Amino acid sequence: MQEASYYKKLENRIVQCQLCPHRCTLESGQYGKCRTRVNHEGTLFTESYGILSSISSDPVEKKPLYHFHPGSSILSIGSFGCNLSCDYCQNCEITQINERIFSKHPSREPEDMVNKARMHRNNIGLAYTYNEPTVYYEYMISCAEKLKEYQLSNVMVTNGYINQAPLAGLIPVIDAFNVDLKSFRNLFYLQRSGASLHPVLKTIETIAKSDK
């Protein structure tokens, strides 16, 4: 468990998470919508740091990215939790979770994943995928920064539901984004994903303007 980034402390040990547009306001002991961030006596912690559900070497086209190092492999990792609640999620066993799941898995240091990526043949780097990488933001940033020291690539496969400040922190170290735009209808996001469309469009616009 590690202190989370992007939150503010309020009165009476209440905190407000600033990572994604839900901006969950949490009393001590409460978890956010993502089920990975918890208020412990007035400090917001992430319980997903270093806890991985999946590690696999995939073709980069499976991300799917068809014009980014075509023909290469990329080591793909995922954790648990998500900040959306899509009723059609194909990975619901790792996204719609009970918080107790984190205590059942060992923690992996960022250096472990970086070294694993370096050892894989024809591997271009790390892809953060399977569940929503935004909810393991701190671990992703740690891995991405260390990986860049070896001139390898970082790929983020995301639902795009992230605030602009944390997104700005990712852009310098993420080489390619795949944003899963689920619909152009806000009502779809509200009814099927428990979110709203505009922040996703803003994420896509920001990434596009960054030339990623």
Image (cartoon, helix red, strand yellow):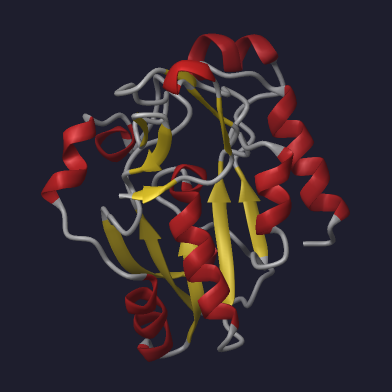
The residue shown at (63%, 37%) is 162
Where does residue 51 sit, x and y in percent of width and height?
Answer: 28, 55
Name the one closer to the observer, 95 or 71.
95
The picture quadrant where one finds residue 67 is bottom right
Q: Height in image: 61 above or below 98? A: below
Q: How many marks?
A: 0
Name the one closer to the observer, 208 or 151.
151
Task: Please identify the residue farthest to the left as the structure is shown.
Answer: 104
Confirm whether residue 90 shows in the render.
yes
Task: Please identify the residue farthest to the front as the structure is shown.
Answer: 12
- Which quadrant would the C terminus be assigned to in this image? bottom right
Confirm whether residue 71 shows in the render.
no
Horizontal arrangement in the rendering, residue 3 relative to residue 102 (left or right): right
Q: Height in image: 190 above or below 14? A: above
Where does residue 35 sit, x and y in percent of width and height?
Answer: 34, 30
Horizontal arrangement in the rendering, residue 126 relative to residue 51 (left or right): right
The picture quadrant where one finds residue 145 is bottom right
Horizontal arrangement in the rendering, residue 118 relative to residue 7 (left or right): left
The residue shown at (48%, 54%) is 138
Name the one closer to the observer, 174 or 181.
174
The residue shown at (64%, 18%) is 196
Q: Height in image: 74 above or below 193? A: below
The residue shown at (24%, 36%) is 93
Where does residue 120 sit, x and y in percent of width and height?
Answer: 37, 86
Where does residue 18 sit, x and y in percent of width and height?
Answer: 60, 33
